[in-house]
Amino acid sequence: MNAETAEPRRVAGIDCGTNSIRLLIADVDATGRLHDVVRRMEVVRLGEGVDDTGRLSEAALERTRAALADYTDQITEHGAEAVRMVATSASRDAANAGDFTAMVESVLGASPEVISGDEEARLSFTGAVATLPELEGQRLLVDIGGGSTEFVRGVDSEVLDAVSTDVGCVRMTERHLRSDPPAPGEVEAAVADIRSFVDRGLAAADPDREAEELVAVAGTATTIAGIGLDLPAYDADAIDGTRLDYEQVVNVTAKLVAADHAERLAIPVMHPGRADVIVGGALVLRTIMEDGGLNSVLVSEHDILDGITLSA
């Protein structure tokens, strides 16, 4: 049997971040492309309070355990041959990360890999570029998460530079954006904090501004794209590959900053678990474009979860 006629291999990837835990069960064909079988996302807020306390709370661990138990049943039901679970920012930062590892082992039957920020960045790039149109020049990919944001510069599927920074939608919300809607002074403080991390991220990943295209992945970017498109409901196919210009990002960010929680929750594309932290994420994306002098951003629905699943 040659590679072209080989049967697809069914694998599963789990991405456990600061805000959400996600599952992808997919068939990998002979060319290395993923064909989705199940794609799920639950907001469990594992990193709730970690920036302040340095520890994962019992409530956050229980929310994550319940979602992981459901995912484990799905993996068994669909007959995945291999599974890889990766944990990112919150698990790197927490003093009691061992409690998280023990919980995962008891539920999934395998240990999670608590990866470095550099590895997180590389997996994000691998997952995203697998479905992007070919580009002769370099791309700068940003993965805005709950506790960290990754900056990755590469060409084709090759990573040239990658850096992870401790700025994310949950971290910035808990640190600065406490009013509803956030007060002007809170927004100013958040932007100043964000800018210090963004400028370091841009300087490390693309010091000579060689990237010709900005790509943004993960929930902050896809939600902003859905709002910018004025979609009546969240539609991953419509969002994937959307290009937003800087003014669109500025306008969506201003709309989110001015809205209270109930108004953000009423936006058709808004996931209920993202409404309280989306302002922080939008400010990160806006600052990246502003400080990087980037006029547009290509939004992709494919990211670290795809990279994890491919690597399984």
Image (cartoon, rainbow, N blue to C red):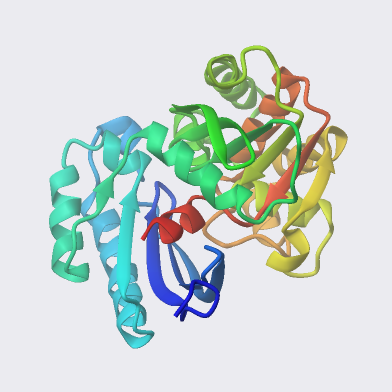
Residue 233: percent from left, percent from top:
74, 70
Numbered disc total: 0
Residue closer to the observer: 184 or 89: 89
Is residue 104 rendered to the left or right of residue 68?
A: left
Residue at 15 percent across and 62 percent down: it is 105
Q: Quadrant of the N terminus?
A: bottom left
Q: Is residue 117 above or below residue 18?
A: above
Residue at 36 percent across and 39 percent down: it is 89
Is residue 174 rendered to the left or right of residue 110?
A: right
Residue 254: percent from left, percent from top:
77, 37
Residue closer to the observer: 64 or 114: 114
Residue closer to the observer: 119 or 48: 119
Residue 131 occupies quadrant: bottom right
Is residue 201 visible in the rendered structure shown here?
yes
Is residue 234 visible in the rendered structure shown here?
no
Residue closer to the observer: 275 or 81: 81
Q: Please identify the residue farthest to the front as the structure is shown.
A: 1
Residue at 74 percent across and 47 percent down: it is 134
Residue 186: percent from left, percent from top:
59, 25
Q: Is residue 91 above or below residue 8?
A: above
Residue 188: percent from left, percent from top:
64, 20
Q: Quadrant of the C terminus?
A: bottom left
Residue 93 occupies quadrant: top left
